[in-house]
């Protein structure tokens, strides 16, 4: 486009940015800006991309645009060297459906640490006694090997515990001094207590949370041309994901948590969503946003659509809603735009 044309477009988005900032009134908190439209091809993705650039240029703040338009994801096409791989859908699927094998691995690794901690605490007490046998230092190394070796097997937790206790018994019975110290009973009690107190659900939940946060960071892509502009693409789209995106993502706690994590690092978070008529759940996401912009296209959006959306917003009680009229034809008088 010509320089004059670019400046006109740039000015339009600077004005839009300024109007949004007036609503925020110098708030230091992160701001979530949702952009949607009644149907596809209303221009909301173009507006999302340009508004993101405008905020990056004019505020010296970190800005991220999130593509939630799973019907037709194309935000990445507005920027060079950005692919649609590893995005929101990938985060959602990874966090929702952590495979059973990974859960087993998480459980075993966490329980192994607890068993080592409990048994070594017993050994430490024994070593601090005045009459402690010197062989306890050797026992500590052997015990470490026994526990780690068994947890690396493919056996069940019950089998692992059974084998550990059996090997501890053989180890203690190999030395007369250890037999007299009742160390076998103390160590096996420590193993059994660690297993009994272990909360599988709590540990798996915590580890999945770490995976979730790491996946978000991995999905964030920096736009090369800008210092503080980033995007998260829609992600890998599969046939079965169409139903998933429409019915789950926009109302899920997972998406709320993604937004919550992004607020820690970004001042402005722009959500480019699917069209309202395709995914009415977008209305629910508006409740998580500081402002929602609805894009209407001149000579395309029907008056009835505007009335329907206005009625729906009133029913739900959504406030801080703005309207962006797209594709307005310039009126020229003697070559000057009015």
Image (cartoon, rainbow, N blue to C red):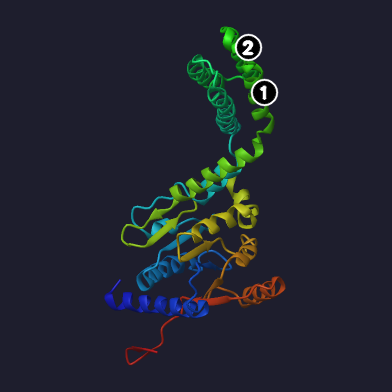
Quarter of the image that includes the N terminus: bottom left
Count the marks: how many? Answer: 2
Mark 1 and mark 2 lie on one chain; the one further toward the N terminus is 2
Q: Would residue 167 be found to the left or right of residue 47 on screen?
A: right
The quarter of the picture where residue 258 lies is: bottom right
Front residue of 324 and 286: 286
Give the residue number, with chain letter if any, for mark 1: 189
- Residue 67: % across, % down: 49, 58
Name above or below for residue 140 compared with residue 218.
Answer: above
The quarter of the picture where residue 56 lies is: bottom left
- Residue 75: % across, % down: 44, 59
Which is in the foreground here, disc 1 or disc 2?
A: 2
* Residue 298 in view of the camera: no
Q: CA distance from mark 1 to mark 2?
A: 17 Å
Residue in view at x 43 percent, y 53 percent: 220
Residue in view at x 60 percent, y 17 percent: 164
* Label 1 crowd bin: few (<14), some (14–19), many (20+), radius 10 Å: some
Name above or below for residue 265 compared with residue 132.
Answer: below
Front residue of 181 and 55: 181
* Label 2 crowd bin: few (<14), some (14–19), many (20+), radius 10 Å: few
- Furthest residue toward front: 130
Q: Would residue 270 be found to the left or right of residue 321 on screen?
A: left
Secondary element type, mark 2: helix
Quarter of the image that includes the C terminus: bottom left
* Residue 30 in view of the camera: yes
Residue 180's disc number:
2
- Furthest residue toward left: 3
């Amino acid at each position: 486009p010509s320089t004059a044309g670019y400046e006109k477009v740039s000015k339009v988005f600077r004005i839009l940015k300024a109007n949004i900032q007036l609503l925020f009134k110098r708030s230091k908190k992160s701001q979530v800006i949702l952009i949607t439209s009644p149907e596809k091809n209303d221009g909301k993705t173009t507006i999302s991309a340009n508004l993101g650039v405008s905020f990056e240029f004019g505020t010296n703040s970190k800005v991220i645009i999130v593509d939630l338009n799973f019907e037709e994801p194309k935000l990445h096409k507005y920027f060079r060297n950005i692919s649609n791989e590893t995005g929101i859908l990938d985060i959602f699927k990874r966090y929702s459906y952590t495979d059973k094998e990974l859960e087993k691995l998480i459980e075993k690794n966490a329980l192994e640490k607890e068993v080592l901690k409990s048994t070594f605490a017993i050994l430490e007490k024994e070593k601090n006694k005045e009459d402690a046998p010197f062989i306890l230092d050797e026992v500590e190394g052997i015990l470490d090997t026994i526990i780690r070796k068994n947890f690396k097997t493919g056996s069940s937790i019950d089998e692992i515990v059974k084998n550990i206790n059996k090997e501890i018994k053989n180890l203690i019975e190999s030395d007369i001094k250890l037999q007299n110290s009742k160390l076998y009973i103390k160590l096996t009690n420590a193993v059994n207590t660690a297993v009994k107190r272990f909360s599988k659900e709590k540990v798996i939940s915590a580890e999945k949370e770490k995976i979730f946060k790491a996946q978000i960071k991995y999905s964030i892509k920096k736009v090369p041309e800008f210092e503080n502009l980033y995007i998260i693409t829609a992600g890998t789209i599969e046939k079965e994901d169409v139903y998933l995106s429409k019915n789950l993502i926009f109302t899920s706690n997972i998406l709320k948590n993604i937004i919550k994590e992004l607020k820690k690092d970004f001042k402005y978070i722009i959500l480019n969503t699917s069209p309202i008529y395709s995914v009415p759940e977008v209305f629910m996401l508006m409740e998580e946003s500081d402002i929602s912009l609805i894009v209407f296209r001149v000579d395309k959006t029907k008056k009835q659509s505007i009335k329907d959306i206005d009625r729906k917003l009133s029913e739900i009680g959504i406030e801080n809603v703005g309207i962006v009229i797209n594709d307005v034809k310039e009126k020229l008088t003697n070559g000057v735009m009015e």
